[in-house]
């Protein structure tokens, strides 16, 4: 009996040590410098999710989609809403979209394939129609002058579940949008280092992510091309960090492209090659995916369409008759010039007050004070207009792949 009692005491002591370790390590924020310096990440295959040590002397072979799939133990709220586990896709919870800058753990994740395992000594090739082909290491880019741009990034499929009939593709609700502060080297600087051939018309950026597709032969690698005029904008970045910290693997570590104003597919992650090309690119993700298919016309998806949504009050909230309605509006076609709000199901529109955005490419805050005419349930809608004159429509023209849904959205409130 004494032996059994002693063994129970030993087991209790061991388990208390284990859970103390979990609590201590789980309180770390994965987006902090110390988290990366410690090289400790959550092991998704461990029943206890104990932190595993990464041998930094070896080439990085991290398991795909590590800690970003999970919330730290210190948090009770979900950091992301999972859309698909393999490859990992997840959207930002609506509650996390109230801040001007989306916290890194809450930034939506889009991937067409598994996350490639790249190391910090990664390098990229610059070739094609250039005068001086280059090989550039990540460390070389870090030593170059850096530029910071705050930009709203939206997945082209954001809002797909709101389209009728439901198109094919990932079933995104409305959380595949985030605003991030990116830092890196302007793509134009690297292109000019290589020397641009006069015949070049597009810049093709290729990622390390690849895999099979049902409607393509062999292995398809993710790549997208930009018109050379767009690529030479000084705010198009080869980004090394987001929100002041190194890129995480799910968001393109160690290097990704950021094209402010364009839907997210243009911002290629895990860059391996940059090529200047002399004829329009006809690759899979330029002509078979991320394209609008309207009748017989097929055009590549490009700049974000004007859009808006309500952050306060929350959908389904109980409110008083006097309410403050606020939210965000954005567009890849120019500044937001007007936001209107309706509490009469779209029969009457009231102009909201627009505040200053953090940058020309970041979403614009807006707000309005309204009084509902009587207690009961109300449909609250917002619609934005940009500098090009485009206004959110009641319904978009349906397309087979479900891209560019910028139709007016609504919330419900119960006023007392």
Image (cartoon, rainbow, N blue to C red):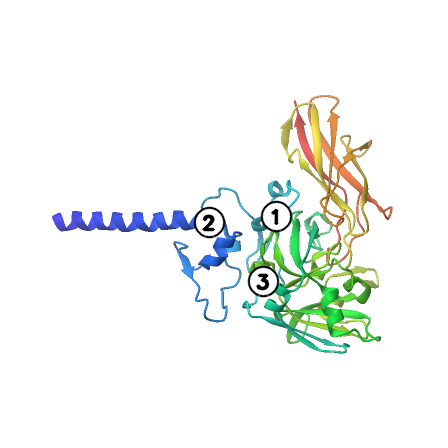
Would you name the residue on which mark 2 appears?
Answer: 28
**161 or 46: nearer the eye?**
46
Q: Where is residue 245 in the image (x, y as percent from the top left)?
A: 57, 54
Would you name the residue on which mark 1 appears?
Answer: 92
| Secondary element at image label 1 | loop
Give the quadrant of residue 367: top right
- Residue 289 placement, left or right of 72: right
Q: Which of marks 1 and 2 is in front?
A: 2
Mark 3–mark 2 distance (CA, rounded to whole Å): 20 Å
Count residues near mark 1 (Cα–Cα under 10 Å), then give few for <14, some for 14-19, many for 20+: many
Q: Where is residue 243 in the image (x, y as percent from the top left)?
A: 61, 51
Counting the numbered discs, the total is: 3
| N-terminal label among 1 and 2 | 2
Mark 1–mark 2 distance (CA, rounded to whole Å): 20 Å
Q: Can residue 323 be seen in this view?
A: yes
Give the quadrant of residue 213: bottom right
Residue 182 image label: none
Among all residues in the image, which is located at the extreme left? Answer: 2
- Residue 139 placement, left or right of 36: right
| Secondary element at image label 2 | loop
Q: Which residue is drawn at 79% across and 69% down?
A: 202
Q: Where is residue 344 in the image (x, y as percent from the top left)?
A: 78, 30
Would you name the residue on which mark 3 appears?
Answer: 253
**164 or 374: nearer the eye?**
374
Q: Which of marks 1 and 3 is in front?
A: 3
């Amino acid at each position: 009996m004494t032996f059994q009692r002693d063994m129970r005491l030993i087991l209790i002591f061991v388990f208390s040590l284990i859970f103390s370790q979990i609590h201590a390590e789980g309180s770390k924020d994965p987006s902090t410098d110390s988290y990366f310096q410690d090289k400790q990440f959550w092991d998704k295959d461990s029943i206890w999710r104990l932190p595993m040590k990464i041998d930094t002397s070896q080439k990085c072979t991290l398991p795909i989609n590590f800690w970003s799939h999970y919330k730290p133990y210190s948090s009770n709220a979900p950091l992301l809403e999972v859309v698909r586990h393999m490859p990992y896709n997840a959207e930002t919870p609506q509650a996390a979209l109230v801040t001007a800058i989306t916290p890194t753990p809450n930034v939506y994740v889009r991937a067409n394939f598994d996350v490639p395992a790249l190391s910090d000594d990664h390098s990229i090739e610059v070739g094609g129609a250039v005068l001086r082909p280059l090989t550039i290491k990540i460390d070389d880019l870090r030593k170059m002058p850096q530029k910071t741009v705050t930009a709203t990034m939206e997945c082209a499929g954001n809002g797909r579940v709101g389209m009728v009939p439901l198109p094919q593709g990932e079933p995104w609700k409305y959380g595949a949008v985030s605003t991030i502060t990116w830092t890196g080297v302007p793509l134009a600087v690297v292109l000019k280092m290589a020397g641009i051939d006069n015949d070049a018309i597009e810049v093709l950026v290729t990622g390390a992510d690849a895999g099979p597709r049902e409607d393509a032969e062999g292995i398809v690698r993710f790549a997208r091309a930009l018109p050379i005029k767009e690529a030479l904008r000084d705010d198009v970045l080869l980004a090394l960090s987001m929100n002041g910290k190194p890129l995480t693997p799910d968001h393109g570590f160690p290097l990704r492209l950021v094209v402010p104003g364009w839907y997210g597919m243009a911002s290629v992650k895990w860059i391996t090659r940059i090529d200047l090309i002399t004829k329009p690119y006809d690759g899979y993700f330029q002509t078979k995916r991320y394209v609008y298919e309207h009748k017989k016309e097929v055009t590549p998806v490009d700049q974000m369409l004007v859009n808006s949504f309500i952050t306060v009050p929350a959908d389904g909230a109980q409110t008083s008759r006097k309410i403050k309605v606020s939210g965000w509006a954005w567009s890849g076609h120019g500044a937001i010039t007007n936001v209107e709000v309706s509490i009469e199901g779209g029969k009457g529109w009231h102009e909201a007050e627009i505040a200053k955005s953090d940058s020309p490419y970041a979403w614009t805050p807006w707000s309005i004070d309204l009084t509902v005419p009587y207690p009961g349930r109300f449909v609250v809608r917002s619609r934005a207009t940009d500098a090009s004159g485009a206004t959110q429509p009641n319904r978009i023209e349906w397309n087979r792949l479900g891209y560019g849904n910028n139709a007016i959205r609504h919330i419900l409130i119960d006023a007392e």
